[in-house]
Image (cartoon, rainbow, N blue to C red):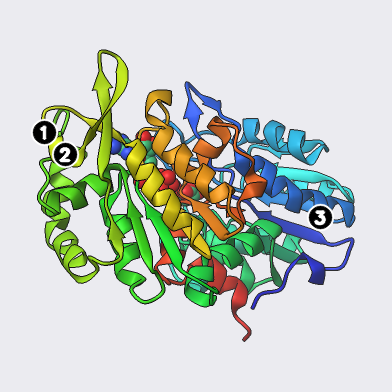
Amino acid sequence: MFKTLDDIGSGKRVLVRLDLNSPVEDGIVKDNRRFARHARTVRELVEAGHRVVVIAHQGRPGRDSFVSLDQHADLLAEYVETPVAFVDDVHGEAAVAAIRDLGAGEVLLLENVRMCEDELPERSPTEHADSEFVRSLAPEFDCYVNDAYSAAHRSHASLVGFPRHLPAYAGRVMEAEYEANTSIANREFDGPVTMVLGGAKATDVIDVMSALDEGVDNYLLGGIVGELFLRAAGYDVGYDVGDGELYDHQWADNEDRIRELLAERADRIRLPVDLAYERDEERAEVPVEGVEKTQPLLDVGATTVGDYGEVIEDSAAVFVKGALGVFEDERFADGTVGILESIASTDCFSVIGGGDTSRAIELYGLDEDYFSHVSIAGGAYVRALTGQSLPGVEALSRDD
Ligand SMILES: Nc1ncnc2c1ncn2[C@@H]1O[C@H](COP(=O)(O)OP(=O)(O)OP(=O)(O)O)[C@@H](O)[C@H]1O
Ligand SMILES: O=C(O)[C@H](O)COP(=O)(O)O
């Protein structure tokens, strides 16, 4: 459906859009799997003797994470194993001069595209193609590669504008993410399809469940989302610390849809039968019947992990969105890690998504190779699961 790096040839001037958006702590950009993944695309372009100019974003104006890409150049260079030059300009004279100075097989990273006013408005590809940003850079290149699948749900200039001026191709990350994440909607599996749904964002999970009625045989719920469903089933769960951020407002916003889903799909939805909480600084577990709404519940319990593991064992495909507990705290990682281990021990087709959830794989030393695909996308993954098209992918696919 789109052209790939296999179709480019060699020795071209290539503009490549990556998603290097990273956590930033005290001004320091944290290494994460996006660098390693995108490095593969960049390395391939370098090896084909192209002049490679990278564009990417970091944060949003007004946030602490809205910083320059100078640190990203060093991190990317480590993974590509070749120097990555940096210029603190997006499309002005300095950027154009640096682009023209580039030799074959060299890599240059331009400044954070969100520092340019043309980038962020959600506009149509035609409007973005006409922006000064896109019009001033496009003539410097022979082609455009979009590898930023995880930002492709945004209709921003650097993601949709260039394919109107230049032959456009998908990078390796774009290809792999697209294929894996749309497979729940596009592929037939030879056996039951299971979704593990957790995390903290009820609306995301409900949207995914609503969109995927036919294709899914089992929903295994956990995390805050699981507790909201348990509440609909009549259990006294959902202790909210502070000003009601996690449960009460999500309950108020989603109660009707949760009740509807539970009534319609009772035979396919599995809820936790036990939960974990903190007692005397240790992990303790309680069956859901015995839960009182007096303390935060931070993970699913061991019986739930066992039950869910049996369902996974019988599945042909498993898709994960959201963690089953607060896995960042080792005491409450058993649910998330236990489920990931169950998936890893079967040979089913598996996709692990959600930026936070896939971090658990790294944190607890699981081998990525045990899964068919570990996504680096958050919002784009949810949209793909719900069957929505992504503007950045659409822009690559146009054939007029
Ligand atoms: N019972 C719980 N109580 C509090 N927090 C929880 C609970 N269960 C899971 N979480 C938190 O949910 C977070 C993951 O939620 P989120 O919905 O953001 O998942 P994600 O899909 O992996 O991420 P993203 O959408 O950001 O890419 C984790 O950081 C975890 O600590
Ligand atoms: O990190 C991400 O999920 C993407 O880069 C999109 O970033 P955004 O939500 O700031 O548009």
The quadrant of the image that shows the N terminus is: bottom right
**Disc with the residue nearer the chain's start (1 vs 2):** 2
Name the quadrant containing residue 216. Answer: bottom left
**Disc with the residue nearer the chain's start (3 vs 2):** 3
Q: How far from the left and from the top, in percent, is residue 137?
A: 67, 58
Q: Is residue 109 above or below residue 153?
A: above
- Disc 2 residue crowd, few under 14, some 14–19, many 20+, Cα 10 Å: many
Q: Is residue 284 above or below residue 104?
A: above
Name the quadrant containing residue 175. Answer: bottom right
Q: How far from the left and from the top, in percent, is residue 292?
A: 11, 33
According to the image, label 2 marks what residue?
238
According to the image, label 1 marks what residue?
293
Q: Is mark 2 on a helix, strand or loop?
A: loop
Q: Is residue 210 left or right of residue 40?
A: left
According to the image, label 3 marks what residue?
45
Instruction: Say if residue 321 shows up in the picture.
Output: no
Q: In which quarter of the image is ligand 1?
A: top left
Q: In this view, does 203 lie to the left or right of 24?
A: left
Q: Is the residue indicated by label 2 positioned so its CB lies within 8 Å of ligand 1? A: no
User: Of discs 3 and 1, which sits in the foreground?
Assistant: 1
Foreground: 84 or 165?
Answer: 84
- Residue shown at the point (22%, 65%) measured from the top left: 266
Verify CB contact (< 8 Å) between mark 1 and mark 2: yes
- Disc 3 residue crowd, few under 14, some 14–19, many 20+, Cα 10 Å: many
- Kindly report the distance in space between the C-alpha atoms of the residues bearing marks 3 and 2: 50 Å
Q: What element carries label 1?
A: loop
Q: In this view, does 318 lie above or below 116?
A: below
Foreground: 236 or 185?
Answer: 236
**Which amino acid lies under the numbered mark 3 shown in the image of this protein?**
Leu
- Kindly report the distance in space between the C-alpha atoms of the residues bearing marks 1 and 2: 6 Å
